[in-house]
Image (cartoon, helix red, strand yellow):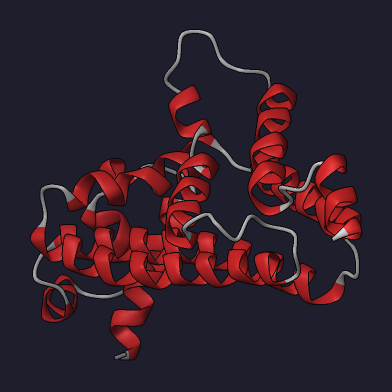
Amino acid sequence: MHSTKERLISYTASLLSEKPGLEIKIDQVLTVSGISKGSLYHHFEDFSELVETAQLKLFCETVDNKITQLTKILGQVQSEEEIKKDFRILIRSTDEGKSKVELFNQLDPLCRSLHSERLKKEMRFEQERLTQRWVLLFEECARRGWGKPELNPRAVALLVQGMLMGRLFDEVSLIQVDLDAWHQVVDLVLESLFFATSPAEKIEKLIA
């Protein structure tokens, strides 16, 4: 990627950490980057493409970082109880540190892609890549005997991705859910998917 294009994306992404994409203006990007308008339009069809590209970059980085951390945890733990504990710690740390702007900028690319064929094409490619990473994570849990092998890995991946974005809907609700209550539900869902072995089932497996 050309260094000027990369800088434009990087500076726009930094602005997105402070405000929603809809509020970012072209003059703000040009000012903070020191890049001319002519250079911007040389690398992007229009300003919307730049914002969409930066949003997609942040969206993918957020999900990739979470999957990478979960994969790392999975490679280090030796027991089901260890990974349950580490999963909970990771999910809580990422949820509690997110601002409303960050939550919005996770959802905005998905909404924009409904009206932009250009972004939809990019989103499809990246979403498939991210889904495959979730699938591999679930399959590894199942291989270790922690997940239910009869569940479709892609269906599980889709559910987990949707669940991890659930707090976005809470931001526009009249009455918001307590964060501890939300994490209690997340824990239950993840445990039923990735660690779907009840005490009775564990005994049955040992006997078998």
Residue at x 68% of width, y 19% of height:
178
| Residue 44, horizontal then vertical, whole percent | 15, 73
Q: Nearer the viewer, residue 48 or 151?
A: 151
- Most distant residue in the front direction: 208
Residue at the image position 74 percent from the left and 59 percent from the top: 146
Q: Is residue 125 above or below residue 5?
A: above
Image location of residue 167, percent across then percent down? 53, 32
Where residue 90 appears, as percent x and y from the top left, is 75, 53
The N terminus: image quadrant: bottom left
Residue 168 seen by the camera: yes
In this view, the residue in front, 194 or 20, is 194
In this picture, is 91 found above or below 153? above
Q: Nearer the viewer, residue 105 or 185?
A: 185
| 80 sits to left or right of 39 | right
In the image, is residue 64 above or below residue 28?
below
Residue at 83 percent of width and 59 percent of height = 83
The quarter of the picture where residue 13 lies is: bottom left
* Number of numbered discs overlaid on the protein picture: 0
Quarter holding the C terminus is bottom right
Judged left or right of residue 52, residue 192 is right
In the image, farthest residue toward the top: 174
Is 21 positioned to the left or the right of 42 in the image?
right
Can residue 32 be seen from the camera position used here? no
Between residues 144 and 75, which one lies in front from this camera angle? 144
Q: Residue at x 84, y 50 (%)?
A: 204
